[in-house]
Image (spheres, rainbow, N blue to C red):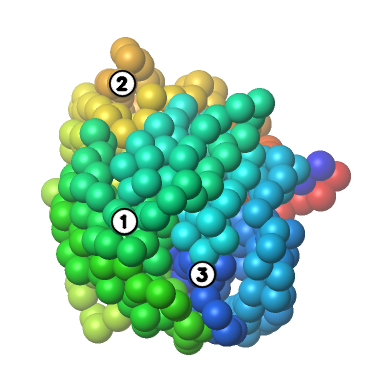
Amino acid sequence: MEKIVVEQSPGLKGEISVSGAKNSVLKILAASLLAEGPCVIEDVPDLLDVRAMIDLLRALGSKVDYYPEENKIITEVVDPSITVAPYELTNRMRASIVVLGPLLARRKRANVSLPGGCPIGARPIDLHIKGFRTMGYTVTTDHGYVEGYVDGVISGGQVYLDFPSVGATENIMMAAVMANGTTTIFNAAQEPEITDLANFLTKMGASISGAGTSIIRIKGVRQLIGVHHQVIPDRIEAGTYMVAAALTKGQVLIKNVLSTHLRPVISKLEETGVIIEERGDALFVDASAGFSGVDITTLPYPGFPTDMQAQFMVMLCVAEGIHSIKETVFENRFLYVNELMRMGAKIKVDGSSAMISGVDHLEGAQVRSTDLRAGAALILAGLVATGTTEVFEPQHIDRGFVAIEDKLRGVGANIRRVKE
């Protein structure tokens, strides 16, 4: 059993370098199933989810060479006849469902087990299936698997998403790149990771316009080739370390960031009184003068990201006054609140809203990481709590943060990982 032990660590100072985006690289790896020839992918974070996707690609007939010390993966399809993604692999992460689109597009058949992952909400794949059917694919669900195949000509179609789902947008986009006609996605997700995937596919020879807007058009092509691609920086990791600097009233330079991807986070931190300076591909966070509270509503991009909600919750727990967080993206995103309350936080949850009354300080306690982002938030809470905080089940954190304890220790945090 492992745990992460955190002691109070005021005034973090120094530099932290951000890794490649988890939510981008997983979809790009899935898209490599479309390519004829090798794909070289760089700035790959060494995460549990990445290793799970590598195992899945190998099970689907790809040769994958992983160089974690170089943050690089070289992958090439060597057996395109495999169309079944087994439960024992897809159950390890939610993102595994995005292999469905590439399999349908290139291999004309797919049988993918419904995925596992963090218990933050239902995240149904109805929108994925609706899009596939609109394009002309036959798709059914039975006994925990989604099965799809080509019955005739895939001519594309006009897909309207009831909600701007990131996964559905990506899956439909990949399923459409080799159709005979044009597919238009209305109310598409606009996250930077969507644009990164579209750029990867375009390099491969796909014809995509509008990525990063609410309307994406994909004109099908006959063949996609292997390419070289560098993954964008992880905006959620960057935002988490920005909050760590703010929370501890520190001064930290966050390197390898794209500030345009972080506008909602930058805006909210500046609203609290924290000073943010843009320095090329870095952001300097200065919270030495302290911070105040804010109200937050999570929204699809370019709104405030749901993946930053838990981290900001910790700030509000120790900010003066009463403030609110409204969660509009996932219905179970407050599972971690009970753990913060064990540390002395005063939080009242009512459905999708939480009211937070600031306290003078948090107290160290034994807490459990309920999901990826919540686990990181509990570490942040430990940085400002009196006594010792022990965060159990850190494997959730390892799904999305590369060596989080090492990076925080590098800026002065008193943190270590313990194996028992």
Residue 16 in view: no
Q: Residue flagged by tag 1: what amino acid is it?
A: Ser
The residue carrying mark 2 is 352
- The residue wearing badge 3 is 34
Question: Observer-nearest residue: 367 or 213?
Answer: 213
Residue drawn at (65%, 67%) of the image: 80
* Left or right relative to 359: residue 410: right
Q: Amino acid at mark 3?
A: Leu
Q: Which residue is mark 1?
A: 155
Q: Which mark is residue 374?
A: none
The reply to whether dot 2 and dot 3 touch (C-beta < 8 Å) is no
Quadrant of the rendered image containing residue 88: top right
At which x and y percent is residue 364? Answer: 57, 35
Is the C-beta separation of discs 2 and 1 under 8 Å? no
Secondary structure under tag 2 reads loop
In whole angstroms, how far apart are the C-alphas of marks 2 and 1?
40 Å
Query: Mark 2: which amino acid?
Result: Ser
* Residue pictured at 30% horizontal, 54% vertical: 156
Mark whose residue sits in front, 2 or 3: 3
SS at badge 1: loop
Dot 2: within a 10 Å radius of its alpha carbon, few (fewer than 14), some, or many (20 or more) residues? some
Q: Earlier in the sequence, mark 2 or mark 3?
A: 3
Q: Quadrant of the N terminus?
A: top right
Identify the element where label 3 is drawn: helix
Residue 171 horizontal/vertical position (percent): 41, 52
